[in-house]
Image (cartoon, rainbow, N blue to C red):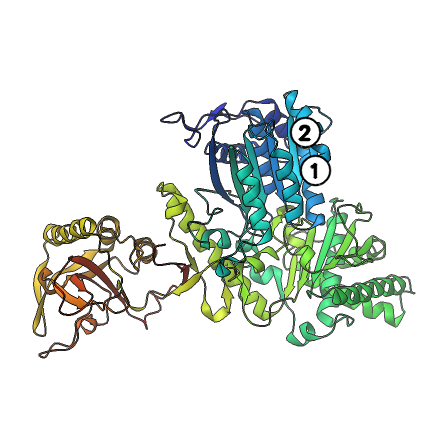
Amino acid sequence: MDCNHHIGMDPADGSGNHPWTVNIDGEELAHLGSRYSSDVSDEDWDSVVRTAADILGRCPRPEAANGTSTELAIGKVQSGKTLSYSTLAALAYDNGYSVVIVLAGTKNLLLDQTFVRLSSDLVGNRPSITQFKNPTKADSEVIESVLHTKRHALVVVLKRQNRILEVKDIFAQPSLNIRPVLIIDDEGDESSLNTQFKKGKQSAVYRSILSLRNTFKSHSYVAYTATPQGLLLIDGIDALSPDFGTLIYPGSGYCGGSVFFGERIEEFVRQVPVDDANKGSETITASLSNSIAVFIVGATIRHMRGDRDWHSMLIHNSSLRVEHSRAFESVKQLILSWKTKLGYQETDPERQALLRIFESAYDDLVRSVQDIPSWESLKNNLSDEIWQVEVWMVNSLQTGRDPMSTPIRLLNNIFVGGNMLGRGLTIKGLAVTYITRRAMKETNADTLEQRARWFGYKMRYLDTCRIFLTEELKSNYRELLRHEDDFWEALSRNMSQGIPVREWPRMFRLDPGMYINPTRQNIANYKRFRGSGWEAQRKLVEDPAIAEKNVKYVKDFFSRYQGVPKLFETINHTTIENCSTEVIISELLENVNTENSDWDNSYYKEYLTRLLLNGVLNSMEVLLMRNGEIEDRTKRDGRVNPFAGRSNNYYGDQYIHGDKVQFQVHIIAPREQESDPRSVVTTSFGLYVPPDDPRFNLDFVVRGKTSDNN
C-alpha cells in the first residue's frame, strides 16, 4: 500500500493547536497496513490514512507542553470507523504520542469487541504496544514502566464513571500526566453527552470524561460516531462541542441506506404486517417464518457457490429481555421442527408443506440473485444447511450469550436481542434482519440509525440480503436516508469551504409527519425551522459600533445593486427586484453582524443555499424599508416588532410580499419607552417564504439556544 510520506501543514507558529506535518511512514502504521493488505484496496487504504492524518494534524503537537483539541469524526453505520481510529492510534504512536485511551462503549460486549479488535490491529505479538483493559491503580507501575522504556500504552476502558475515574487517577500522577495523550471516544454521542444540562447539572459519565480530560496538560479528544446529531446540537459552549470535524467516507463495497432504501428498495425490503408485529414473541408468525426460510435458503445459495463464510440473521423485536427469551425459545423450536420435517420421507405432507415455504423464499431471492442454482439442486442441500444453524440470545440474562467471548461455532447464526444489538456491535455475515421494534410515539433519528445493523460491507453477498420490517419502519428509514444524505451534503460543502465546525449551521432535514426527532431531548435544545411565512429579527444588535457598521453596510449594499424606490400602496421602499440569492448569501448575510441577536445568519445562509442548489430560488425581491428612514420601535421584553402595521391605505409591511419570497431590511431605533430618546440605530432582517409552497418547506431541525447570549 503506497501513499505519500507526510501529510499536513506546518503551523504558522509553534502552538500545539495549529496543523502540523504528520509522518505516515512509521512502524506502527506499516504494521497495521500489512494486516489489511489483502482486505482493503490501496485506494481505500490511502483514504483511511489521509483522513486519520488530517485528524491527528489538528491535535496538539506531540512535543507541545500544553494544548487541547476537541474533534468530531463522522462515519456511517457499520462503515469501518474502527479501522479509522486504529489508524489514528497507529499514526499517533508513530508521531510521538505515547498513550492512546479508547472509551469503548457502555456495555462489556462492546468493550470486549473493541479490545479484541484493537489488540489484533495494533498489538499482535509485538512488544512495542502494551494493552490494558479497564486498568486500575494496581496497573500504574506497569504503565509507568512501559512508558519509561519508550514503548506505547493502549488503554481500553468501559464508558462508565467508575472505570473512567480509575484511569484518571492513574494518569493524575505527575510522572504520567506530562505526556501527550490521545483520547478516542467510540460512539461519542452515547452516554458521553450531558443528560442533565437542562437541570444545570452534569451527568456522571460526562463529568468523569471532563475530569479525565482535565488531568492532562496536553491531549486531544476525538469523538467517533455515525450519528452526530447529538454532538452537533449540544450547546456551542459545551466542553464536548467539537472544534474540528471530519467526514469519514466509506470504502468501496459499502452498502448503506442508499442501497437498501434507495432505488432498489423493492429488492431488499419486505413488509411485516402490523398484526404480526403486535403478536407476542412466543408466536412464530408467517412473516417471521418466511424471513427465517429466506435466511436458510440464502445461506444455501452462498455456500453452494463456494462462499463458505458466516451467514447471520438478526431478530430485533423488543426492548424487553423476557420477550427475547420467548422469541429465542420459539425460534429454537422452529429450527428443531424443521430439522425433523426435512428428515421425513419425500412424500410426507409435513415435509412437502415445509418445502413450499422454502420454495417461496427461493422465489423471493430469485429477484436479486444472479445465476441462482435450480430449485431442485438447492432443496437437496437444505437439510445439511439447517443443521448448520445456531440460535443465540444476546442480552444480559443468565441464559443470554456473548458472541464476542463465545466463538461462533456453526456457519449459520440467528441472533435474538434488543439494546445490546442496537449500537456498535458488528454481526459477522449479517444478511437477514427481522425488525419490528419502534417507540410507541416519537423516536430519535440517531437511535433508529444505530439499529440498522444490516448496513456494512456486504456487496459480496448483497443479493442474499433482506430486511423484514413494518410499513412504518420502512417509511422511517426512507426518511432517514433523506436526512442523512442532506446533512452529509451540507457538512461536506461547509468543510470544503473551510468553515470551522463551530460555525457550521446545525440544520437537519426531518419530516415532522414521521414523528422523528434528531436526538434525545435531554442532551440538546433544538427547534423546528421550516422557512415558511415570516421569520424576523426581533432581538436586535445594539452594540453601537457594530450597529453603525451594519447600517452603513446595508445602505451601501442597496446603492451598489442599484435599488430604486418602489411604491407599495402609499409607501415607498428601496427595492432590488431580482436580487441574486447567491448575493444575499455571500454578501448581505455574510457581512451584517447579527451576533447576540435572535437572528442566526448561518441558518438562513444554509437554508437559502439549499434552495439555491435545488434550483427553486435563484433570486428574490429585496427591500430597504422606507428607503432607509429610521423607524422608531418600542421594546417589549427586550424585543421589537420590526413590521409597521396598516395605516393610510397601506396594508402593512407583512402584507406586501405578493406571496413570493421577499427579504426586508429595516433600520430601527429601539427604545425601552416610547418617550425615550434614540440611543442606537441598528438593523433588522425579515424573510418571507410562501407557507403553502412545498418547494420551500424543507422541514429543518436546528440547534436551539440555552440563553440569549448563545
For the image, the number of numbered tags is: 2
The picture places residue 2, in percent across and down from the top left corner, at 54, 25
Q: In what quadrant of the picture does the C terminus appear? A: bottom left
Q: Secondary structure at mark 1?
A: loop
Q: Tag 1: Cα neighbours inside 10 Å, few (<14), some, or many (≥20)?
A: some
Of the residues shown, which amino acid type is indicated by label 2? Ile
Q: Residue beneath label 1, please?
A: 135
Looking at the image, which residue sits at the far right?
Answer: 345
Callout 1 amino acid: Pro
Q: Is residue 52 left or right of residue 605?
A: right
The x and y percentages for residue 533 are 29, 70
Q: Quadrant of residue 125?
A: top right
Q: As drawn, is 235 to the left or to the right of 259?
A: left
Above or below 76: residue 614: below
Q: Which residue is mark 2?
A: 143
Q: Quadrant of residue 668?
A: bottom left
* Circles 2 and 1 in contact, beta carbons < 8 Å: yes
Percent of width and height locating residue 205: 60, 50
**Viewed as shown, does residue 308 lie left or right of 503?**
right
CA gap, disc 2 and disc 1: 9 Å
Task: From this view, report whether residue 1 is shown above or below residue 612.
Answer: above
